[in-house]
Image (tube, rainbow, N blue to C red):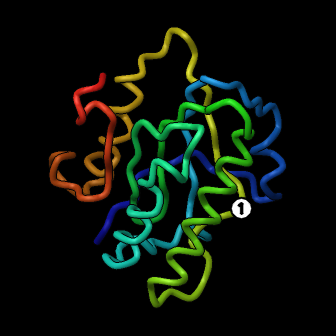
Amino acid sequence: MVQICPMPTFPVSGSFHLRRGRRSIPNQLYLITTITPQRKPHFLDTELARTTVRSMSSVDLWFPSHCLCWVLMPDHWHGLIELGAGPSLSSTMQRVKGATARIVGQSCTFDGSLGDKGFHDHALRRDESIEKAARYIIANPVRAGLVGDPMDYPYWDAWFLDGES
């Protein structure tokens, strides 16, 4: 049985509460979490997970922002985003989630919605380590009991693998 990593509970009354206090600051780093509807583990389906990963890994999809690190879990996605100049954080996530849903809809035999409307964000403070945040993200499969080592989990990536850290 798959153990799902505990996450903060999102308000039932809608995504309005997630947007309260949200600020879009260019060059700011944000930890992002987006969940599947009713936290259903859709991404246990290999075809669906691989298609989603290919879509969300596209540098062009995020431009002018940058996705520095991400992990796709069975029922949610975590990412570390550096917001670019121009579109707001909400617009960026709406574009990424929408494009991913279209690509998955065209490529996979999946009927339904992949993601809830809203997302949770946390702006990294100056005293928070980027590397620590990235390691927290990629360690999610270990904490959830899916693998013993993050390197054994297939659905993640981080900028420091390219030697750019």
Residue 49 shown left or right of residue 104 in the figure: left
Picture coordinates of residue 79 (x, y %)?
48, 43
| 50, 120: nearer the viewer | 50
Residue 6 shown left or right of residue 143 in the figure: right
Residue at the spot 64% in from the left edge and 65% down from the top edge: 98
Packing grade of label 1 (10 A; few <14, some 14-19, many >=20) is: some
- Which of the 4 image quarters holds residue 154? bottom left
- Which of the 4 image quarters holds residue 50? bottom left
- Which of the 4 image quarters holds residue 31? top right
Picture coordinates of residue 142 (x, y %)?
25, 47
Q: Secondary structure at mark 1?
A: loop
Q: Where's the N terminus, which quadrant?
A: bottom left
Is 27 drawn above or below residue 64 in the view shown?
above
- Residue farthest to the top, as pictured: 127
Residue at the spot 52% in from the left edge and 74% down from the top edge: 103
Residue 1 shown left or right of residue 59 in the figure: left
Residue at the spot 26% in from the left edge and 55% down from the top edge: 145
Q: Where's the C terminus, which quadrant?
A: top left
Q: How many marks?
A: 1
Q: Amino acid at mark 1?
A: Lys
Residue at the spot 55% in from the left edge and 10% down from the top edge: 126
Q: Disc 1 designates what residue?
A: 117
Picture coordinates of residue 23 (x, y %)?
77, 29
Residue 117 shown left or right of residue 140 in the figure: right
| 141, 130: nearer the viewer | 130
Is 96 drawn above or below residue 44 in the view shown?
above
| 160, 123: nearer the viewer | 160
Picture coordinates of residue 63 (x, y %)?
57, 43
